[in-house]
Image: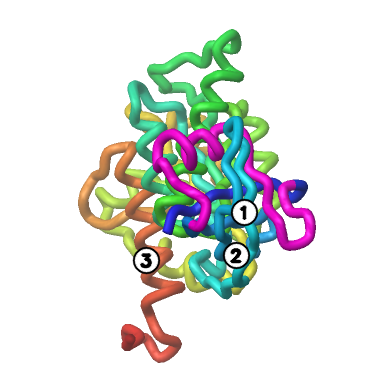
Amino acid sequence: MQRYFVSGQAQQGGIVAISGDDAYHIARVMRMKPGDGIICVFPDGRTAVCEIEQIANEHVQARIVQWKEERSELPVRIYIAQGLPKGEKWELVIQKGTELGAAGFLPFEAARSVVKWDAKKAEKKVERWKKIAKEAAEQAERTVVPDVRAPLSFVELLSFGQTVDVRLFAYEKEARNARHAALPALLSRLRPGGALLAVFGPEGGFSPEEAEQLRQHGFSPCSLGPRILRTETAPLYLLSAASYEWELRAPNGEAERA
């Protein structure tokens, strides 16, 4: 059943009013008709099965049939910060990272970023990134759309780090020196409802100055295993490791059985 994230103002009693791109998608792309079912997700994470009652002038009206209990979110919030990579790599990270449960995405301007942020195109770029996250969240049947920010300065990134419980940065020197214990230890420190900020460098990695500043602000350097990963692969590795730690591994250390 197709899923749509709707605004808090969309619900009036048992009726949900849908407009804009979602209404267009229902009417023109999916070619739905009155009587068809959809799932509506509200900003507070509540989810309802709805039945379309009316489609007119790209406005859709649906009736709530049943509220659903869903548990598709990670029990911890993981924010992905990355030095702006080139091409479509950042969009890939947003899409796949959303599918893997990330709570938010924070690009930042790193010393070795090949891409330079164009402020003139900022609004359209961020709008596109948010759309990618929304569509990925719908596909993954999530109940929350991740927060996607405009690029931060390095100083702003360090400041954001003070708002979370655990801070780390992926550092290839840790992998080359076979120091692999930090990531499991940091993940085990988190508690349900806690937040982690994971920072990844661009293609050229962190400059020595950036690595030192991160350390000074409480970010722990981490290996992501014995292999050196591409900048767009590293965040997905971390999210997968977090999913195993928090969703697949039982408290006694054995995988949960279905």
What is the three-letter code of the residue carrying label 2?
Ala
Q: Secondary structure at mark 2?
A: strand
Q: Check if residue 96 falls in the magenta segment.
A: no
**Closer to the camera in the image, 31 or 230:** 31
Q: Check if residue 27 falls in the magenta segment.
A: yes
Mark carried by residue 206: none
Q: Secondary structure at mark 3?
A: loop
Nearer mark to the viewer, of 1 and 2? 1
Give the quadrant of residue 181: bottom left
**To which residue does mark 2 refer?**
48
Which sits earlier in the primary sequence, circle 3 or circle 1? 1
Give the quadrant of residue 226: bottom left
At horizontal 39% and vertical 30% (from top left) the residue drawn is 202
**To which residue does mark 3 refer?**
181
User: How far, Cα to Cα, is label 1 from label 2?
Assistant: 11 Å
At horizontal 56% and vertical 59% (from top left) the residue drawn is 51
Which sits earlier in the primary sequence, circle 2 or circle 3? 2
User: How far, Cα to Cα, is label 3 from label 1?
Assistant: 51 Å
Specify start and end residues of the magenta stretch as a single range: 10-35
What is the three-letter code of the residue carrying label 3?
Ala
At horizontal 54% and vertical 29% (from top left) the residue drawn is 108
**Closer to the camera in the image, 124 or 194:** 124
Mark carried by residue 62: 1
What is the three-letter code of the residue carrying label 1?
Ala
**Closer to the camera in the image, 194 or 101:** 101
Give the quadrant of residue 59: top right
Whether residue 167 is visible here, answered yes or no, is: no
Whether residue 95 is visible here, answered yes or no, is: yes
Nearer mark to the viewer, of 2 and 3? 2
